[in-house]
């Protein structure tokens, strides 16, 4: 059996569980159907991303970075912080900033 760590909604800590099948898990000695469990996003803290960390990414901009406000291509990857609204939990929809 495979083991995993999960964070349940309304819990501050992650817990270990056993995966019995693609539909059932064993947690704290009790068997649950996966659809009964409300999982939370396991990420805490700050998540960073990198832009232009592949050579082809910069080439795809086709010289747009040679003009103001940048005037030249970056010398290395660009780091950024992922906003909180990009995180979502299991079986939830992702929030959007678009107005409909």
Image (cartoon, helix red, strand yellow):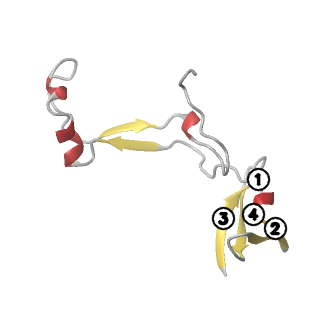
CA separation, marks 2 and 3? 15 Å
- Sequence-first disc among 1 and 3: 3
Label 3 residue SS: strand
Q: Position of residue 5 (x, y in %)?
A: 66, 64
Residues packed near mark 2 inside 10 Å, few (<14), some (14 to 19) or many (20 plus): some
Q: Say which of marks 1 and 3 sits in front.
A: 1
- Residue annotated with mark 2: 32
Going from N to C along the chain, the mark reached first, 3 or 4, is 3
Q: Is residue 49 above or below residue 100?
A: below
In terms of sequence position, does the residue under pointer 2 or pointer 1 come before the other?
A: 2
Q: Are marks 2 and 1 in contact (CB under 8 Å)?
A: no
Check if mark 3's residue and mark 4's residue have beta carbons within 8 Å: no
The relative height of residue 74 versus residue 43 in the rendered view (above or below) is above
Q: Residue at x 69, y 50 (%)?
A: 40
Mark 1 lies on a secondary structure that is: loop
The reply to whether discs 4 and 1 touch (Cβ–Cβ < 8 Å) is: no
Looking at the picture, how far across and down is residue 83, in whole percent?
52, 34
> Which image quadrant for residue 96?
top right
User: Which residue in the protein does label 1 denote?
Assistant: 38
Q: Earlier in the sequence, mark 2 or mark 3?
A: 3
Label 1 with label 3: CB-CB less than 8 Å = no
Q: Residue furthest right?
A: 30
Question: Marks 2 and 4: in contact by CB < 8 Å?
Answer: yes
Q: What whole-number distance in Å separates the C-alpha atoms at marks 4 and 2? A: 6 Å
| Tag 2–tag 3 contact (CB < 8 Å) | no
- Residue 53 % position (x, y): 27, 46
Closer to the eye: label 4 or 1:
4
Q: Nearer the viewer, mark 3 or mark 4?
A: 4
Report crowding for label 1: few under 14, some 14 to 19, many 20 or more residues within 10 A (C-alpha). few
Instruction: Say which mark, if any, is on residue 34.
Output: 4
Residue at disc 4, secondary structure: helix
């Amino acid at each position: 059996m495979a083991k995993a760590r999960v964070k349940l909604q309304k819990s501050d800590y992650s817990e270990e569980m056993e995966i019995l099948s693609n539909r059932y898990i064993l947690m704290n000695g009790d068997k649950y159907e996966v659809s009964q469990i409300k999982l939370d996003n396991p990420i805490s803290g700050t998540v960073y991303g990198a832009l232009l960390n592949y050579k082809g990414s910069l080439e795809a901009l086709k010289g747009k970075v040679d003009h103001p406000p940048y005037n030249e291509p970056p010398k290395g990857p660009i780091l950024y912080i992922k906003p909180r609204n990009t995180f979502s939990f299991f079986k939830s929809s992702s929030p959007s900033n678009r107005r409909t």
